[in-house]
Amino acid sequence: MHRADMLVIGGGIAGLSVAARLARHGRVMVLEGEGAPGYHASGRSVAFAHYGLGNEPVRTLTALSMGELAEHGTMHPALHIASTADIAALDALEDVHRQFRCDYTRITTAGALALMPAIRPEACAAALVDHGSLKLDTNAMLQAHAASLRAHGGKLVTGARVHAIARDSDGWRVEAGGESYAAPILVNAAGAWADDVAHMAGVTPIGIEPRRRTVISFAAPEGENVGAWPFTKTVGEGFYLLPEGRGQLLASSMDQTPSAPCDAAAEELDIAIAADRVEQATTLPIRRISHSWAGLRSFVPDELPVIGHAAGAQGFVWCAGQGGAGFQTAPALSRIAAAAALGLPFPEDCTAAGLSARQFAPERLDA
Ligand SMILES: Cc1cc2nc3c(=O)[nH]c(=O)nc-3n(C[C@H](O)[C@H](O)[C@H](O)COP(=O)(O)OP(=O)(O)OC[C@H]3O[C@@H](n4cnc5c(N)ncnc54)[C@H](O)[C@@H]3O)c2cc1C
């Protein structure tokens, strides 16, 4: 039996970021079912931090995280483009950028084309460029959290898929990878599988909905310095596009197809839709898809993370529902989750920014 003060199920960004914080307060073991951390959603993101997604609390979490994210990010502009029909949505997004005091500029079609010459003018009646967005090194983020966990005496156990959870007078007992683990506190950071973990523990599920998102990669036009192109995103339905590595571009139609928790794979139709959206709105010819992948973004109905103790299950702490913003909110969210697990007050700066423990508590979903 391996005894710890806190067990964390899930070695994605959610689990590792909270585990790294908890390890300063006790012995922490992270149990990850796959052979390496970050295999699922956390290994499939497009690694960007910006204000063009999520609801207000998610944007507030992003704002509270930007300073720490900068350690593993480089400034890269985000260009939000709007067709004539989407001008009102662009206005609303401008209000958001003003509210969060972003370094942004509202620009014309010509201004957008100067930044991103492949846009077809008819796809961009107006635009907004956020100069303060970040391209993240998500692998470095995961590795830094794992290193911090180890440096504080914690352990990441891979190949440890949890298949049974029981509670006795000492706390939680967990069976994984042929070994038994025990701790009074159990953090559920199992991403798309968060409700499966709750079922095993006899805890009321939160109704997590994994949604599949597809990304394609294709060669940029020869001779074009695409590395300088902004992360380009339609404010309404459409696509996003960003440079990646040498001469490659990534794109997504921002699909979000409900899925069972699984090792998500890109489907032909979703790949075709992403390519078509890019070709409709830009002059980029996609002759061949170099690579494609899909990952699951997991939400509850109000699209806010779920952080806090499960009612009636002492020591069971939720850290789930990060949706499409798990990296860009991780610095703030892991502080909130660590405080909840340790029974400490909600972080002061988060309260000052208008957030509250109640907003993220699992009980809100009972209503
Ligand atoms: C295409 C795409 C693009 C994205 N782009 C961005 C972006 O630009 N910026 C951003 O901030 N976010 C982005 N996201 C969202 C981000 O990737 C997620 O919010 C984040 O990775 C969720 O992290 P997680 O740790 O909760 O989940 P995961 O990374 O899925 O981790 C959960 C882990 O739990 C493990 N697990 C599950 N069940 C068990 C069990 N029984 N026993 C042991 N282990 C178990 C799994 O193996 C998994 O490794 C994107 C997501 C996708 C799919």
Image (cartoon, rainbow, N blue to C red):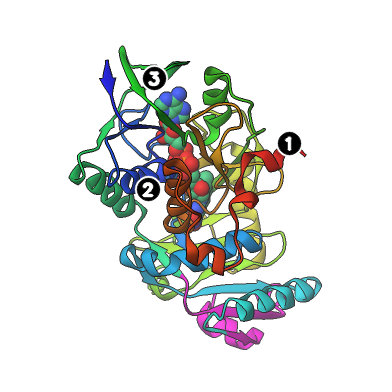
For residue 264: magenta? no
Out of 193 and 107, give the one closest to the viewer: 193
Q: Which residue type does callout 1 highlight? A: Asp
The location of residue 258, given as percent across then percent down, is 67, 36
Out of 270 and 219, give the one closest to the viewer: 270
N-term-proximal mark, 2 vs 1: 2
User: Label 1: which residue?
Assistant: 366
CB of mark 3 near ligand 1 (< 8 Å): no
Q: How many marks?
A: 3
For residue 131: magenta? yes
- Please state the extent of the stretch shown in magenta in the rendering: 105-133
Q: Which residue type does callout 3 highlight? A: Asp
Out of 244 and 161, give the one closest to the viewer: 161
User: Label 3: which residue?
Assistant: 170
Q: Is 246 on the left-hand or right-hand side of 266?
A: left
Pointers 2 and 1 in contact (C-beta within 8 Å): no
User: Which residue is drawn at the image coordinates 60% and 27% (left, top)?
Assistant: 312
Front label number (2 vs 3): 3
Q: Quadrant of residue 159?
A: top left
Pointers 1 and 3 in contact (C-beta within 8 Å): no
N-term-proximal mark, 2 vs 3: 2
- For the residue labelled by badge 3, is the local secondary structure a helix, a strand or a loop? loop
Out of 191 and 314, give the one closest to the viewer: 314
Rendered position, 170 above or below 30: above
**The disc label shown at residue 224, or none:** none
What whole-number distance in Å separates the C-alpha atoms at marks 1 and 3? 28 Å
Rendered position, 118 above or below 208: below
The location of residue 123, given as percent across then percent down, is 69, 72
Q: Is residue 119 visible?
A: no
User: Label 2: which residue?
Assistant: 17
User: Which residue is drawn at the image coordinates 46% and 61% (left, top)?
Assistant: 48
Q: Which residue type does callout 2 highlight? A: Ser
